[in-house]
């Protein structure tokens, strides 16, 4: 067993001890779920899948469909258009709250029922077209064709008066502009899609991977859409536990009344979890506990301060030229360079600058150079050139990261390589 | 003018065009502010200060004091104790909302007035001791001794009935356990501390720097406290604009009714901004616009997908030994290695493993090795050793990042250095 | 012109000066109303009709239908059954408020939209049967067959999403148990019935006349139902102006968004009023002003203390019998005798009671003898008889008001008549 | 035992069977009350006192002080001034609700805590003057000097943070304009006055008697003030049971958390009741049940239709004059004559009116003639006179009820008396 699977097994074993909470009675099908079922799945950015417990047990996706339909809508219409009809504010309220923004009639956010109904209504097309697009997109997020549980959907439909009420209320308030019945029907269907923990983990990983499914390689939604969806999940995904979830766990998530949870650690992994017992806020008890433990073991909290790293400028030397008169200064950089790291580079270039000196800046071990950081360094190099310094930027990786790369740098590459 | 200052000047110039909003009339002193004042300051993790406009104009800190007093309370009492008296949920409500959690009587979060009064009341000591600690802590965050505006404080005190009402309400509900008058008095004083944009930028940078003031080097609060404060700022800092702020700007912030704003991009920078005109939610119009522009230019959005970086395993080779029979595999790593990167390392070690082979793993350009990632790699190395592979970990940086470093690796260092 | 018509004309003239308020834009047909239209009608318990201004101008009844459909439901199902599905509490909220009682899901009261929809849904039968009964009952209240404005109804139906939302919400909460669409459809129709001021005055007079239409003599609903409807109109009929209406005007009323108002002064009169301009609470401005003036001129406030009246015992004498030994005491009563008046009767009987005396109690001018008052007097007479007093009750009106009337009283009637 | 006492004893016995509800734990002194205590007292307009059970058991008046302090404030300042600071709308909310009117900051009504604090603050004078006036007025309502329970007051004061919160909130909102601490202190004191059931019955009877204490004969407040107080009690006195109370019981009341209840049937009686166990809305269980039974037995419901009474015109005859040519019409009236009865009088005068006729209108048994009714009859008489009818109004009671009394009527009196 690999270490990640082993960690996941330990997390599963720990959370399985918890028997608090109650299985939802919202639908008879949910109420009939075995309360002891408990699955976990983690999918990495590399598309690897790790499983623990009942990771293959099927369940209906319910509210976890919301962020993914929101993603579809954003991809189709853009953020500004979507926000005209649904807000993005955490409400501090329960999932089925009735509160529309005064003046606009907008529901609080796309993660509560009202907002999700508006979101589904914004998907272009008539009822069947909407449904086709939604099913197609959620399947693309999961990397396989998802099927609907007809039985659950029929029950949702039969008992869906509160959601119908929300739809008509929003129509009267102007935030729901399509047919109310269509919006609710499509919403019931999306909630009735059948998934398992691995599906949810892949879907979350796709959001955390800039919209690209790490298993299939398909770009499901643009990166900016994924960024927006993750943001809304971070502030609104866990109902009235959203704030404490961010404190205790610290990465975007969404829970569903069937006992499922999806959570996405950007650029790291997606988590899918399932266990039917819910706490009084409607979040699944064991999945929440497991996510909290995962966050600690994997250092996934977005605000976690990672502490010191190795220096960006890992090597610097200023050697007098053998022929006298000049100096060759070498600065070798490594790692990710954004604003903060760029500042340390500029500091390391402070001494350079007398006429006749030569500067060699080696970017070979830079793993990422952020736009502004590049501009900051570039500006400094340009100034040095104006002062008469001969600047050479080397990059054995073959990438040309800085715009102001001296043409002559090519010539120096061999010399530098020999020297290092 | 350096590039950062130049960027800041452009951002300032852009936002200065906006003349929307109204100066607060909450206090006569606020109402008397020159509406055209507009300052910006950025402080980096290196402690560098960048300024634009009226960055030295003084103003009272008002609600921007809240996260820093919350930090003090967390440092004194710990998260669990503090959360017994104040929640951490975004309320979707205005700054002066009266809504206490049913059952516990807790205010929604420490960023609304009610929560801030509880926070201040939790600071140990009597009235003057509380005040002493608060002033000391906020001064440490700012890196200089802050003074109170006696005149503003007197006005706050005279007109502070709503805050008194909140205090008594919370006392009756059990969430405020100290003297109500003391709590409110201390709260009025902290709101009356005089700061400028640079102060706010330093304070925010301190939070983003793991609690260490980047200018003075003082550890003001523990790193975990800074993490918690940033999280609550992210979800609750901008009142009922919190959700859209995270969408549009994307890093933790707090606004004050004087027109000020502090925002912290973890590990990057702190922003201080000031301009008196407020929007209808009580956030300063120009500072919000400036922060949004800064976020885009500096790539500061927490959910922003940075796209591809250079490979973690930047060099790999498997050379048959000259003497035959064996192979020496070299794997050279670079950059930050967390879970996702560790996976690619493991993938690069997949082929290694026949008896008689030798593995050299070079960590010299690894800038940070996350705990779990280290354990993942370590576990793989231990397995290889069990299979008979001779493993050597090299690290020219002199750090010993992996626990399972082969003692013999020291011997190989020279050879490796020569080869590279 | 008779005095009542003349008073009404003065009231009309006074209120016609008011041009405040805005015509409702809820429906285009309402928005198109001539804002200067202003009619008043008063119908007395004797069925007389008094008119002023545009008393014959037609308009849709809108929310004024609510108390009359409530009356129908009470008559069919009884108070306890109806209250299981709709409350009777003033909400202090607007007409279209969404607030259901926690636990029961009941709307606040039958005078707000939600409660009225439940009320209509409780009318027995399918959609057309419900509608038939409602139209029949409201027509009986008005004393003529009312017609529906098909055009208004179609518009209500087209724009009725908020009411549909309320219906579905109550179905999900369990307080609306019939088909939601049927309930809303029937509600739209009842609101679209066309009436004029005289109709509304007759309808109100019917409620104030114990459920008997004073013009047609038809008992539309039982007296107890009328009592219940008047009570709910008193506390809930004027939305969030209900309390001040009772202070300023002081008798049960209901307003409608078309600008109409019905008000009922029990045992006195019914008022119908119409003028399209509404205040911000949705009550018609001129009708409210006219009702207030009417209340003052006609002394209609329910809590108005009427001050002293003539004594109940208007004549008392104790004459020694001509034959000696005995006394004949005469007590003559007048007016309405309830508890308070009965007490004064008992006080006047205090001196009576020695053996050998004769008591003659004359009820000829008693206009009403309340049950308990009768029992009080009766008990006293029985006690006197036990003490040996010969009691004779006379009643020239031929009514036998007291149960314990002495048989011998018949003999005394002539004597008494002669004496008086 | 008189009948009223006997009825009261039966009502007491019936309600004493109820053991539902819980004694308030708001104050330790309340919690220590014997839950079985149960007293009833009725005081009539004649000042008679009827008792059942523990009618002399003392308790603190608590919220039942509210309507009487409201009366004091109305008497001092007038309705319009008082309504500027406190509303008169039933809120549908609990006694300690925090909801102020948007825009004005007014509490809902004077019967909830917030409104009562404003009411007390409006009493003129400083703290001790306010208190002096309040104690004086409540004592005048009760007809004896009331004492404060110092112990209860101290406990109220110590635990009164919620009320302090309300006071400060209203100060900040502008509806409470005096010192917040003074207002709350005075409110605590008034709640701590010690009364018994007889006191509460006398107080209620005073309100129902036009402000005149029926036992002492003192005019405590003007009649109009009593009318206003009764109206507000009718709509707001029983918290969120106000609407159903009016349906089931039907006359103005106010309950207190000590388990007490006062209720006033205008022109009939005052009820005082006490038993510590409260229902979930804070109303005393047995007192509510007893009041409901009392209402039914005594016919006290304000909306109760009393049905037919004897005719107003009880005798009419038109006799040809012995001398020929003319006619003498006699119309004899009885009972209370308001608008509705006046109409029947006019109807009885319809046939009168040919020249040469004589009309004799006998008002001797009219017990009350309402202003408008008098004007209506008067106008008809004037018209008859214009037509040449000789009108004589007789009134053996010696009152001159109609303004247009024919001077010659004096002459006819003897004749009429002989004829009747």
Image (cartoon, coloured by chain):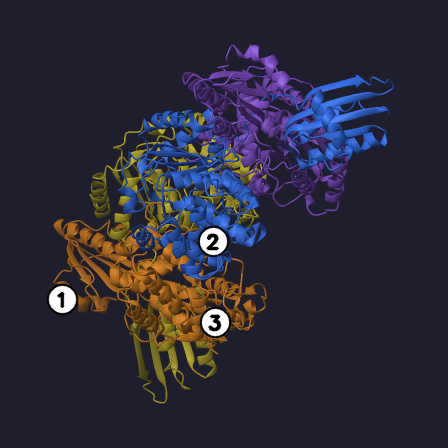
Chain colours: A yellow, B orange, C purple, D blue
Q: Which residue is mark 3?
A: B40
Q: Residue at x 42, y 62 (%)?
A: B254
The secondary element bearing badge 1 is classed as helix
Q: Is residue A381 left or right of residue D385?
A: left
Q: Residue C126 at x, y = what percent?
A: 56, 18
- Residue at the front extreme? C323
Q: Nearer the viewer, residue C273 or B50?
A: C273
* Mark linked to residue D118: 2
Name the quadrant containing residue B183.
Answer: bottom left
Q: Residue C53 at x, y = what percent?
A: 77, 36
Q: In the image, is residue D291 above or below residue C411? A: below
Q: In the image, is residue A217 above or below residue A154? A: below
Q: Is residue A419 left or right of residue A66?
A: left
Name the quadrant containing residue C38.
Answer: top right
- Residue at the bottom extreme? A325
Mark closer to the chain start, 3 or 1: 3
Q: Chain of mark 1?
A: B
Q: Nearer the viewer, residue B256 or D35?
A: D35
Front of the two marks 2 and 1: 2
Q: Residue B38 at x, y = what percent?
A: 52, 72
Q: Chain of mark 3?
A: B
Residue C55: in sight, yes or no? no
Q: Are marks 3 and 2 in contact (CB under 8 Å)?
A: no
The secondary element bearing badge 3 is classed as strand
Q: Residue at x 74, y 40 (%)?
A: C12
Have a look at marks 3 and 2 and say if they share a chain.
no
Front of the two marks 3 and 1: 3
Counting every numbered tag in the picture gives 3
Quadrant assignment for the N terminus of chain D? top left
């Amino acid at each position: 067993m690999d270490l990640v699977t082993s960690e996941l097994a330990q997390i599963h074993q720990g959370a399985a001890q918890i028997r608090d909470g109650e299985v939802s009675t919202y639908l008879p099908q949910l109420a009939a779920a075995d309360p002891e079922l408990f699955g976990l799945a983690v999918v990495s950015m590399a598309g690897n899948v790790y499983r623990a417990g009942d990771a293959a047990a099927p369940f209906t996706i319910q509210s976890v469909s919301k962020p993914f339909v929101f993603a579809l809508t954003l991809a189709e219409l853009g953020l500004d258009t979507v926000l005209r009809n649904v807000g993005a504010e955490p409400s501090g309220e329960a999932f089925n709250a009735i509160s529309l923004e005064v003046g606009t009639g907008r529901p609080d956010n796309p993660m509560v029922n009202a907002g999700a109904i508006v979101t589904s209504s914004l998907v272009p097309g008539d009822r069947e077209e909407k449904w086709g697009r939604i099913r197609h997109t959620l399947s693309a997020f999961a990397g396989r064709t998802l099927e609907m549980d007809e039985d659950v959907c029929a029950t949702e439909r039969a008992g869906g008066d509160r959601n119908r009420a929300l739809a008509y209320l929003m129509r009267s308030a102007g935030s729901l502009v399509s047919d109310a019945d269509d919006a609710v029907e499509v919403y019931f269907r999306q909630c009735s899609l059948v998934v398992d923990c691995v599906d949810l983990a892949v879907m979350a990983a796709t959001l955390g991977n800039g919209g690209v499914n790490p298993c299939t390689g398909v770009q499901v939604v643009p990166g900016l859409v994924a960024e927006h969806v993750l943001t809304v999940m971070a502030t609104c995904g866990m109902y009235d536990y959203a704030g404490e979830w961010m404190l205790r766990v610290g990465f975007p998530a969404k829970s569903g009344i069937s006992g499922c949870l999806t959570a996405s650690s950007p650029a790291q992994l997606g988590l899918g979890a399932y266990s039917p017992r819910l706490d009084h806020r409607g979040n699944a008890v064991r999945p929440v506990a497991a996510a909290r433990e995962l966050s600690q073991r994997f250092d996934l909290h977005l605000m976690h301060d990672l502490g010191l790293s190795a220096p960006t400028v890992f090597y610097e030397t200023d050697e007098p030229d053998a022929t006298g008169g000049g100096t060759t200064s070498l600065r070798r950089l490594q790692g990710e360079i954004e604003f903060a790291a760029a500042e340390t580079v500029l500091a390391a270039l402070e001494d350079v600058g007398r006429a006749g000196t030569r500067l060699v800046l080696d970017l070979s071990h830079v793993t990422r150079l952020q736009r502004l950081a590049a501009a900051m360094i570039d500006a400094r190099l340009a100034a040095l050139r104006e002062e008469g310094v001969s600047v050479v930027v080397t990059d054995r990786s073959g990438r040309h990261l800085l715009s102001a790369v001296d043409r002559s740098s090519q010539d120096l590459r061999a010399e530098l390589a020999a020297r290092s």
